[in-house]
Image (cartoon, rainbow, N blue to C red):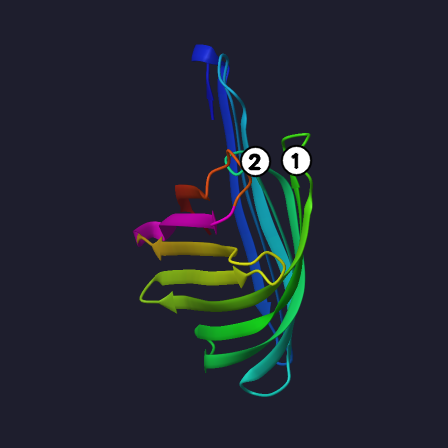
């Protein structure tokens, strides 16, 4: 979007891909927001992930995952997280997937203040995710990830994500998505949380 007054321009993107085969699953997502305006500081936020699940039985799997986050509100120049874990399906069907994962991650963070040292840490990763497809014209995806730190005592990070899409008559649809990032021990001057909410209406063939 662009508004001539104060040269306000904004770009947002929310994209995701999930594919499930008989023996594996791949997934990825990207969320971005950039905003520029005369007389105000620029706002930039980027986050995303990519991962691979290898099914070891009807109910269990092994996961490898990479994720990143950059946002102004938490003064994060970049957070890279790579990890692995084991998961279990509570529900696994053609329309509904609900799982839980436990594992360990390596996290590296660089911050926007030039004098702020970077952080490297090990974290426990605990998560649960649910995906529901074509249930009464509704598509739903939600996840909760918790990261208790093993390196920094008492530190806890939490990432929440929620997406919903509802099909309307004549092939129109409405959708909404939100991502919330929480850190109970950010650097000095940074916010403990950041949130983004995106909505849209569209038409599809």
Q: For the view shown, which residue lies furthest in the bottom direction?
A: 57
The residue tagged 2 is 75
- Along the line of sight, which residue is nearer the eye, 52 or 21? 52
Specify whether residue 42 is painted magenta: no
Left or right of 140 in this view: 154: right
| Disc 2 crowd, CA 10 A, few/some/many (<14, 14-19, 20+) | some
Label placed on residue 116: 1
Residue found 44% across the figure and 68% down from its top:
130
Q: Which of 18 and 196 is in front in this view?
A: 196
Question: Looking at the image, is mark 2 or mark 1 nearer the viewer?
Answer: 1
Quarter holding residue 124: bottom right
The region drawn magenta spans: 169-185
Q: Position of residue 116 (x, y in %)?
A: 65, 35
Relative vertical location of residue 183 with respect to residue 97 in this rendering, above or below: above
Please say whether residue 36 is visible from this viewpoint.
Answer: yes
Query: Is the magenta region chiefly helix, strand or loop?
Result: strand
Dots 2, 1 in contact, CB < 8 A: yes
Q: Where is residue 44 shown, x and y percent of the image?
A: 55, 32
* SS for callout 1: loop
């Amino acid at each position: 979007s662009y508004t001539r007054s104060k040269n306000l321009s904004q770009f947002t993107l929310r994209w995701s891909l999930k594919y499930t085969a008989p023996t594996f699953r791949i997934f990825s997502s990207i969320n971005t927001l950039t905003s520029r305006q005369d007389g105000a500081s620029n706002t930039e936020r980027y986050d995303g992930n990519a991962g691979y699940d290898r099914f070891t039985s009807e109910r269990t799997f092994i996961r490898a995952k990479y994720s990143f986050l950059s946002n102004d509100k938490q003064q994060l120049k970049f957070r890279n997280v790579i990890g692995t874990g084991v998961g279990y399906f509570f529900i696994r069907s053609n329309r509904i997937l609900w799982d839980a994962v436990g594992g360990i991650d390596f996290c590296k963070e660089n911050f926007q203040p030039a004098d702020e040292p970077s952080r490297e840490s090990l974290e426990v990763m605990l998560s649960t995710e649910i995906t529901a497809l074509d249930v009464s014209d509704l598509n739903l995806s939600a996840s909760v990830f918790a990261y208790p730190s093993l390196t920094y005592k008492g530190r806890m990070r939490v990432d929440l994500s929620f997406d919903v899409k509802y099909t309307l008559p004549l092939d129109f649809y409405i959708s909404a998505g939100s991502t919330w990032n929480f850190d109970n021990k950010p650097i000095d001057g940074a916010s403990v949380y950041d949130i983004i909410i995106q909505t849209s209406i569209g038409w599809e063939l």
